[in-house]
Image: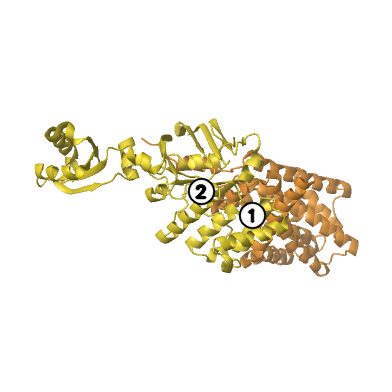
Amino acid sequence: MTPPAVEARSLSRAFGARAALADVTFSVPRGEIFALLGPNGGGKTTLFRILATLLPPDAGSFSIDGLDPAAAGRAVRRRLGVVFQSPSLDKKLTVGENLALQGDLYGLPSRARAARVHELLEMFGLEDRACDLVETLSGGLARRAEIAKALLHAPPVLLLDEPSTGLDPGARRDLIDALASLARSGTAVLLTTHLFEEADAAHRIGLLDRGRLLALDKPAALKATLGGDVVTVEAKDDAGAPALAEGIRSRFGAEAGRITVVGPTVRVERQAAHTFVPRLVEAFPGAFKSVTLGAPSLEDVFIARTGRRFREADAPEAGSGAA
Amino acid sequence: MARHERHVKSSLALARREIVRFFRQKSRIVGAVAPPLVMWILVGSGFHGSFREDSFAYFFPGTVVLVVLFAAIFATISVIEDRREGFLQGVLVSPVAPFSIALGKVLGGAALGLMQGLPLLLLVPLTGLEVDAAGLLAAAALLALLAFALTSLGFAIAWSLESTQGFHAIMNLFLIPMWLLSGAFFPLDGAPPWLHLAMAVNPLTYGVGALRRALGGATPAWMSAPLSLAVTVAFAVLMFAAAVAVVARFPAGPAARLAAAREPEKP
């Protein structure tokens, strides 16, 4: 049996007294896109840095293609393609020079290197920019060049930290397509993201919050864990949500389904919510700022698991540029 | 064999990058060569006549070493920039060994130092020093050795620093005094005893002395050619060993500490 492309076993890491990562276990087979979804400061970047061999875990272990990085560090690194959140291309070199340098760092023989550089430039539509300095590229093109660089040595595992940072929606779409085609050709793609739409495109999602893996499943399966639809009611005044939730509970009882208060909103999970909404509105005339009804989203899953909204969960000051 | 070849190839690729980057940043060329030359002319003129030997001749070897030292400093400051701009993270996740990372940077920086220092030797006829071809050749070889040693020293310092400001502080507090106390600026003999001692334990003193001797200048009798060469070689080897050691010991440099500081504790 072939070992999984990535296998993490009870990975933990603390910074001082704070546990950035606590007992995280999962595995990623070849050909899968696996998204680590979570708010900033949730532990994604710590996990990414551990898997990229930049940071040793305090406890637990992981393997890449069945290889232990502690025993076979160089072999593990040869199997990893790493795309960082911040650029790692040399801005003063051309795209072609950057890729050639990467080939030398990974020990590709000269002739194979030239062919491979050409192949990747073509794959990412960069042929006509090969001789341009990286500092002259747009954000989207530079991102493509980053990924091309990470793939130069044909790694079976591709790690990406917040890959769509700074990309416009079109470029983001292109990126997701490129990752999908890589996965189809057998590469294991592991990415971190705080964007629900990006996670939605993955085969499986690991929900990471406060260093813990809260859920691990296919996007559809995660959403199916919620009770049908989600009705979100925004109270008229910000402080009114708890009272409103109490009101709904006493008016409808068990029929209302699962009720949670999140900030200024009350969320109700239940089956066939379309029949419930008119009665809800009639029962509390004028008490709402808005009422929305929708199929559960990944954000709903996050709220259901943590009781917090995603943006509120962002750790202060973490985020942009965290290495 | 194949593995060694790969290591050398990685190092050479990294060294080549240093040189390519240098020539794409024109201000660096002017910044490294012009100040020592201006200083040589000003100081040489100022002390003209107040020295036993001709001051232009006396300051010349030290000036060449200063050009190489500046080149080494600029080259190794780029380690800090590489880290900040993100290039280094890509190197650190690659299978390149710490030895190759250090060698690449040091070879690149030393080559740049040599490129800037060697042409200065063409000015020898203007200095009043009398030197033959063999002396010039020896001077070039010594310069290469010094460039390697000083770039290694700069690299070992710069690797663990997170800001170029920090490097400037160390440069002013440590590297420039090291040059001043190397016999480049004033002779050992005649210095007060405590200063003489500081100069005698400064490894750069022997490098400057050896270069001065190769260029036909006068050196103290106790500083023999074999002694100054041996100390300079040992200096280069030790500094390079230190450069490799810091990469191996602290692969992430100051990054782990920074990352910890950036991820604040949740209430």
Q: How is the image coloured?
A: by chain
Q: Residue at x 45, y 39 (%)?
A: A43
Q: Give the x, y percent position of residue B259.
A: 50, 42
In the displayed structure, A308 sits above or below A106; it is above
Q: Is residue B263 left or right of residue A81?
A: left
Helix, strand or loop status at disc 2: strand
Which image quarter: residue A111? bottom right
Q: Give the x, y percent position of residue A36.
A: 45, 42
**In the drawing, what numbered circle is on residue A217?**
none
The mark total stands at: 2
The chain to which mark 2 is attached is A
In the displayed structure, B23 sits above or below A80; it is below
Q: Is residue A2 visible?
A: yes
Helix, strand or loop status at disc 1: helix
The chain to which mark 1 is attached is A
Which image quarter: residue B198? top right
Q: Are marks 1 and 2 on the same chain?
A: yes
**In the drawing, what numbered circle is on residue A102?**
1
- Which of marks 2 and 1 precedes in the sequence? 1
Relative depth, front residue between A309 and A170: A170
State which quarter of the image contains the C terminus of chain B.
Answer: top left
Which chain identifier belongs to the orange chain?
Answer: B
Amino acid under label 2?
Answer: Leu
Relative depth, front residue between B236 and A8: A8
**Which residue reaches farthest front?**
A1
Relative depth, front residue between A68 and B55: A68
Q: Is residue B186 visible?
A: no
Amino acid under label 1?
Answer: Gln
Q: Give the x, y percent position of residue A32.
A: 50, 45
Q: Colour of chain A?
A: yellow
- The residue labelled by disc 2 is A160
Q: Badge 1 local density, few (<14 within 10 Å), some, or many (20+)? A: many
